[in-house]
Amino acid sequence: MTRNGIGIRTAQVRSERLTGQIHVYDGAGKGKSQAALGVVLRSIGLGINTPSNSNRVLLLRFLKGPERDYDEDGAIAALQRGFPHLIDQVRTGRAEFFGPEEITAFDRDEAARGWDVAKGAIASGLYSVVVLDEINPVLDLGLLPVDEVVRTLKSKPHELEIIATGRAAPQKLLDIADLHSEMKPQHHPTAKELLINGIEIYTGAGKGKSTSALGKALQAIGRGINHPGSTRVLIMQWLKGGSGYTEDAAIAALQQSYPEVVDHQRCGRDAIVWRNSRQELDYVEAERGWEIAKTAIASGLYKTIILDELNPTVDLELLPVEPIVQALLRKPRDTEVIITGRCQNQPAYFDLASVHSEVYCHKHYANQGVELKRGVDF
């Protein structure tokens, strides 16, 4: 059968890999740390439904010292309180930007401290996922020896997943990566001319679009937890019907603890939809999802709205473009809308994006026949 258009992998029962991979997210575009946070959310969700501690996560954040508050801090703290057996977090460095000429002894000591933690965590066998957030610029600044980091990552335990983020990943790290997604910023003059803010789009063939959106949701949930009543989050997902998505359990746990903060909806069949295999139910489900999203955008009740996989839904012509454009033009100024998914032709609402990251796929283990992994990829 010829497959035309965009198809989205679903969470249907399938074989999955056991071997852990090395992921690198770099580039000048937005979404790198957010993608790592999305994987954290999925991994914790998998661990909630697993009786053992086999899905423990370490979130090691370089260059993000405790002197500054970050949007995701509240949600991470809430996850740690609710599931202390599933997530550890370590922060190192000073909480401000600095260049090569401004490096201090403190910066080198903090980078070394973080790397000591990383080496111990990698060797321990206690974790299924180790996130090295912002390690790429640490290496680029020369705060850690690249050869030692590469050597340690190459000898990691067989099943351990490693995620490295940040701009300017060194070539030696990219050489050993199983997955390399580069976030490239795209600019839309129309958004600037019309003074439109708060619309973010993540598209492209690389991995990191939906996980970036989940990370963004986690950041927004953190704001809502820290400032009750000031923000609510809607996560609306198209082309992802059925069950088996590991982030569901973590989101449900946050909903139970903070029901006033987050809402989560899915629509679609639990099947891959191609242009020449569309069914009437696909149109019905797509429209149902849009009715929920349209109302949420107009209401002003939600400060962050995730429209996950809206792009391929439009690309498959399951939804018309113009109503989406009009809804985004009329959105309240303090409402953020995040839209994800690949598409062959950019719809008109891309011109309204104040942030647009094109995720380029330089490497992906799936292209080498490696199966996807529950708790990491879906």
Image (cartoon, grey):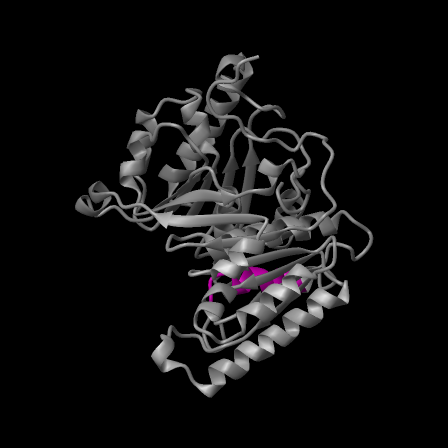
Q: Residue furthest left?
A: 193
Main SS, magenta region, reads helix
Nearest the eye: 154 or 356: 154
Instruction: Let me know if residue 76 is in the magenta part.
Output: yes
Provide the residue span drawn in magenta: 70-80
Position of 110 compared to 242: left or right?
Answer: left
Say if 222 sits above or below 112 in the image: above
The quadrant of the image that shows the N terminus is top right
Nearest the eye: 17 or 297: 17
Q: Position of residue 316 (x, y in %)?
A: 44, 21
Instruction: Let me know if residue 276 is in the magenta part.
Output: no
Q: Is residue 94 visible?
A: yes
Nearest the eye: 15 or 171: 171
Nearest the eye: 335 or 46: 46
Position of 345 compared to 133: left or right?
Answer: left
Q: Quadrant of residue 125?
A: bottom right
Q: Position of residue 349 (x, y in %)?
A: 31, 34
The quadrant of the image that shows the C terminus is top right
